[in-house]
């Protein structure tokens, strides 16, 4: 049972203890484009693509494949994600959903044990936790529509990194050591990632099978993953280990172009991800609520401000539990939840009633009755295109499963479904019918890739990992910049807080000094290690400012070097 206990710990500790550093923000500036990612090698590859004259889409695809090699905790081809785009040529915004899908053989109660109780180990670890991956399909679709350099050239850097290997940083070695229990359960995973355990620092991570898989994708595009050798290796390994994904599931997978969600906040336009992510809807909902308060009269991160944020967050996460799911399966009341009118009612309630325990807040209280390891990157190019992309395998190192012979580390995205009403998933999130498991359905996400516009021009690109805390991290960057006029570095550095309705407590990053005042107001406080890691770009007067969040220390923002 040791694996179970330690695994659970690993799931709870999504964040790796941060190194103590004075500032979390690392930045760079250029007038020719910028790349911000969670790994310096991926950032350098992206910057190189832009320098060669590639566009932001090319750079995003190259970065996405590179992260699958150098950031195995989150970067992936065995997972899925979302990309929000501003395209200069068409002067329009786009959103692509390449979220994983439940296999055809999945069913609602698949994670209940013989006593009818939800078994979180089943939904988070091993072959049964895996959704049908969408990443390769998503990148392919983006390339087909907007790419300018050859597909093969964009995968080549990742192949070289996988084949020749790269030297593991202190932070990466520490991360792998922390997850050694999880990463040693399956031989395939252990043999690749823990070969030199426990002396991983400065050792070279070589991923030969992954290089071969990437070469098939390089040569055959979609068929290099969703059919042919890769697909049959995935299906065979699944079958041998009791997993559900078949060759047909892979063949049936499609990414989907969706209309981005749009809102306004104090005159700026917010363009963000629609369902099956809950991120965009609740980001806009919370901004709408907060627009009814004069935030600039609050001291930043004072207890009064943290209290206001917390009350706002509770209403949003309550609604999330009831109304949010895959829009192809459940009618999500997007316009109601994002309406200014609804936000006014909630803000009036906050003004009148002040701090309410979560038990007094119900989903949709003021809706008119008639009517859940991840990484983010942001890229901007000199042509004017802007990309905000978040993708994931859910927990750090996903399900712990590496498909035999492929080097593909698989997601555990199935835990983002609501396995049983009223029972929280690994992020403590609750859900109901809207997000119950159905074949081919996409699990609800919190990923919030977002672009903010000022006078119709892209101004900010943001996003983060962090499970349920993603939405509130993105929210606070926007508030810090717009209401508190912080620089992007300061906005990144500032301590973050989070409330998600249940559990009924405020998560606060360490060293917050007004905890007693919040306790006096009736709050329970949970002091947390860093959990989020934003990768942001601000576009200001023709300059691109990239800011990486060193809450995960390998992060790097790099501007294109002007000659
Ligand atoms: O889609 C979601 O909301 C989750 N699967 C994201 C997981 C995550 O951010 C974990 N990273 N720290």
Image (cartoon, rainbow, N blue to C red):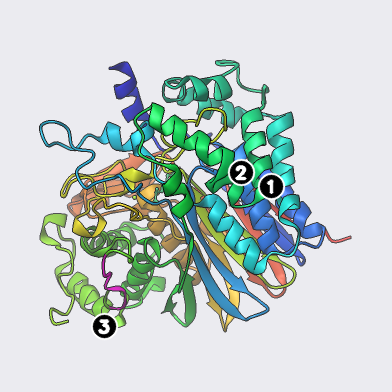
Task: Identify the residue shown where x is 53% and y is 51%.
Answer: 135
Residue 459, percent from left and from top: 59, 72
Would residue 327 be counted in the magenta stretch? no
Residue named by callout 3: 341
Disc on the earlier residue, 2 or 3: 2
Residue 464, percent from left and from top: 49, 53
Magenta span: chief secondary structure: loop
Residue named by callout 2: 67
Q: Is residue 400 visible?
A: no
- As drawn, is 148 to the left or to the right of 410? right
Q: Residues within 10 Å of mark 1 (few under 14, many from 20)?
A: many
Residue 318, percent from left and from top: 22, 60
Disc on the earlier residue, 1 or 3: 1
Mark 2, secondary structure of its residue: helix
* Badge nearest the viewer, 2 or 3: 2
Task: Give the magenta part as a residue range.
Answer: 330-335
Residue named by callout 1: 218
- As drawn, is 382 to the left or to the right of 187? right
How far is disc 2 from disc 3 in space, using C-alphas?
A: 42 Å
Q: Is residue 100 visible?
A: yes
- As drawn, is 204 to the left or to the right of 560? left
Q: Which mark is residue 389?
A: none
Task: Identify the residue shown where x is 47% and y is 83%.
Answer: 267
How far is disc 1 from disc 3 in space, using C-alphas?
A: 49 Å
């Amino acid at each position: 049972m040791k694996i179970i206990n330690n695994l659970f710990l690993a799931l709870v500790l999504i964040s790796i203890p941060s190194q103590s550093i004075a500032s979390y923000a690392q930045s760079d500036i250029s007038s020719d484009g910028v790349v911000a990612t969670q790994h310096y090698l991926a950032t350098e590859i992206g910057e190189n693509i832009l320098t060669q004259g590639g566009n932001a889409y090319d750079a995003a695809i190259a970065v996405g494949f590179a992260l699958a090699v150098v950031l195995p905790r989150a970067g992936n081809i065995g997972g899925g994600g979302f990309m929000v785009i501003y395209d200069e040529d068409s002067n329009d915004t786009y959103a692509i959903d390449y979220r994983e899908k439940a296999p055809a053989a999945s069913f609602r109660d698949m994670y209940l044990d013989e006593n009818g109780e939800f078994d979180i180990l089943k939904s988070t670890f091993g072959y049964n936790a895996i959704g049908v991956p969408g990443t390769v399909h998503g990148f392919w679709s983006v390339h087909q529509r907007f790419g300018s350099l050859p597909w093969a050239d964009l995968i080549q850097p990742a192949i070289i990194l996988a084949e020749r290997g790269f030297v593991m940083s202190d932070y990466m070695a520490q991360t792998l050591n922390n997850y050694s229990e999880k990463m040693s359960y399956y031989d395939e995973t252990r043999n690749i990632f823990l070969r030199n355990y426990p002396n991983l620092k400065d050792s070279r991570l070589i991923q030969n099978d992954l290089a071969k898989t990437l070469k098939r994708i390089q040569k055959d595009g979609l068929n290099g993953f969703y059919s042919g050798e890769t697909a049959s290796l995935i299906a065979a390994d699944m079958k041998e280990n009791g997993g559900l994904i078949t060759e047909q599931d892979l063949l049936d997978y499609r990414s989907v172009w969706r209309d981005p969600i749009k809102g306004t906040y104090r005159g700026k336009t917010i363009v963000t991800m629609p369902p099956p992510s809950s991120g965009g809807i609740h980001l806009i909902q919370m901004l709408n609520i907060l627009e009814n308060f004069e935030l600039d009269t609050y001291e930043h991160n004072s207890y009064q401000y943290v209290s206001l944020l917390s009350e706002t967050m509770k209403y949003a996460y309550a609604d999330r539990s009831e109304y949010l799911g895959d829009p192809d399966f459940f009618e999500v009341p997007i316009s109601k939840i994002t309406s200014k009118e609804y936000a006014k009612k909630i803000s009036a309630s906050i003004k009148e009633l002040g701090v309410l325990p979560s038990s007094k807040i119900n989903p949709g209280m003021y809706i008119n009755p008639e009517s859940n390891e991840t990484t983010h990157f942001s890229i901007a190019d000199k042509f004017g295109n802007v990309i905000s992309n978040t993708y994931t395998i859910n927990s750090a190192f996903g399900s712990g499963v590496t498909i035999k012979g492929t080097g593909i580390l698989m997601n555990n995205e199935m835990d983002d479904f609501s396995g049983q009403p009223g029972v929280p998933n690994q992020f403590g999130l609750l859900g109901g019918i809207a997000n119950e498991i159905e074949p081919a359905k996409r699990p609800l996400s919190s990923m919030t890739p977002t672009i903010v516009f000022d006078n119709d021009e892209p101004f900010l690109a943001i996003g983060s990992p962090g499970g349920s805390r993603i939405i509130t991290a993105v929210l606070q960057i926007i508030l810090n910049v717009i209401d508190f006029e912080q620089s992007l570095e300061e906005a990144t550095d500032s301590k973050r807080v989070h409330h998600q309705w249940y559990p009924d407590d405020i998560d606060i990053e360490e060293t917050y000094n007004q905890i007693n005042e919040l306790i006096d107001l009736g709050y329970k406080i949970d002091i947390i290690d860093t959990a989020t890691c934003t990768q942001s770009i601000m576009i200001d007067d023709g300059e691109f400012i990239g800011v990486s969040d060193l809450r995960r220390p390998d992060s790097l923002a790099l501007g294109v070097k002007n000659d």
